[in-house]
Image (spheres, rainbow, N blue to C red):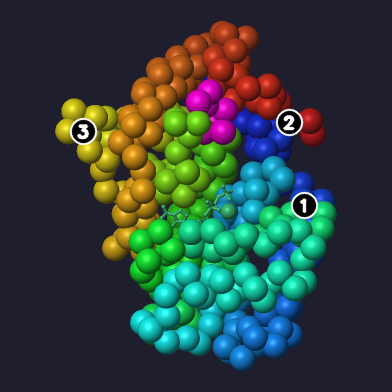
Amino acid sequence: MELNSYFRGLLSNIEPNQCDIDRAKQAHEDLRQLFLLDDEISKADPDSYLSGSYARDTALNHIKDVDIILLIALDYKSTEPEVVLAWVQAALQQYYSQKVIRQGRSVKVTTDNGFVLDVVPAVPLYHRDGPVWIPDRDVRQWVLTHPKGQIEFGVNKNKATQGYYKHLVKIMKHWRDRLPTEIERANSYIIESLVAKSLHWTPLSYGRGVVDIFHHIYSNYAAYLNLHTVPIIADPGYPSVNVAKRWKFEEFKAFIQATRSSLSIASSALADEEKEKSIMLWKKLFGEKFSPREE
Ligand SMILES: Nc1ncnc2c1ncn2[C@@H]1O[C@H](COP(=O)(O)OP(=O)(O)OP(=O)(O)O)[C@@H](O)[C@H]1O
Ligand SMILES: [Mg+2]
């Protein structure tokens, strides 16, 4: 059964509540203000905007982190990624009592009330609304990405599917979070990109959308298991980037195996006309949060 009221209930149980949203807003506004005030960063003509799942409205519950793009004027070709990340880290650690940590492509800031912000220094390729170069410490190179293109894609896809797209991204991220082993849990942006590629039109219901997504993933990518390779998955917001570039084969394999068994459960849940049995099957995928919305 489609059980729409249960899917709506699931969404209200996994979406961030107003308190999480207010906390995130305060944290990113405070930090973005510092870019303009800091002696060092302010010299680089800084500008910033939000990126990641928070900006695209695909974040879950407590909002794992808020991703912030920090645009700076810099001759990136003559600057090592490591140096820029260290420079941002040094500037920000003056203002936060908790550790400010340098990561592969960003600087992670934890606020006093435990909220996490990821600052990604970036240099525009052509102009401030277009693709940007970001530092990648691991490969010691600057790489291209297009956070605004990703946001725009999400807005358009959501309109084209009458709001189903963002909801189904959240539902699939919640499914991912409940997978029993870490190796199966594909990273959030891979999930989001796979949902983007699976949804060609407005699904008839959430339940059908979920089955369509599992079916699309399994039928398009299972063959790669025999080839022993991870497929290329173009970034929906910037197709020249392969979002699966860092996905290891064993992780991909475990994810496809999880998709196969979930496809079978979701298909049975949708087909079953006995309400209690259908609920029990959907709960195997989504847990106790799959409950009817209290109006
Ligand atoms: N493999 C990737 N390819 C391209 N861009 C990526 C990739 N992984 C992450 N990103 C970009 O970095 C952003 C932040 O990544 P992060 O891991 O925080 O995921 P997210 O989409 O914000 O989801 P959440 O934080 O809710 O788990 C992504 O939203 C996306 O814009
Ligand atoms: Mg994030």
Marks 1/3: CA distance? 41 Å
Mark 3 residue element: loop
Residue at screen point 47% across, 43% down = 187
Nearer-N-terminus badge (1/3) = 1
Marks 3/2: CA distance? 43 Å
- Residue 64 percent coordinates (x, y): 65, 48
Q: Residue furthest left?
A: 227
Answer whether labels 1 and 3 touch (C-beta < 8 Å). Answer: no
In this view of the protein, which residue sits in the foreground, 229 or 63? 229
* Image quarter of residue 31: bottom right
Mark 1 residue element: loop
Nearer-N-terminus badge (1/2) = 1
Q: Is residue 70 above or below residue 285?
A: below
Q: Mark 1 = which residue?
A: 114
Q: Is residue 106 above or below residue 243?
A: below
Residue at screen point 60% across, 74% down = 88
Q: Which label was assigned to residue 228? A: 3
Q: Is residue 41 visible?
A: yes
- Residue stretch rendered in magenta on the structure: 175-181
Residue at screen point 42% across, 80% down = 79
Q: Which label was assigned to residue 293? A: 2
Type of amino acid under label 2: Arg
- Residue 207 percent coordinates (x, y): 51, 29
In this view of the protein, which residue sits in the foreground, 120 or 163? 120
- Residue 20 percent coordinates (x, y): 77, 51
Answer whether labels 3 and 2 touch (C-beta < 8 Å). Answer: no
- Residue 14 percent coordinates (x, y): 67, 38
- Alpha-carbon neighbours of circle 3 within 10 Å: few (<14), some, or many (≥20)? few
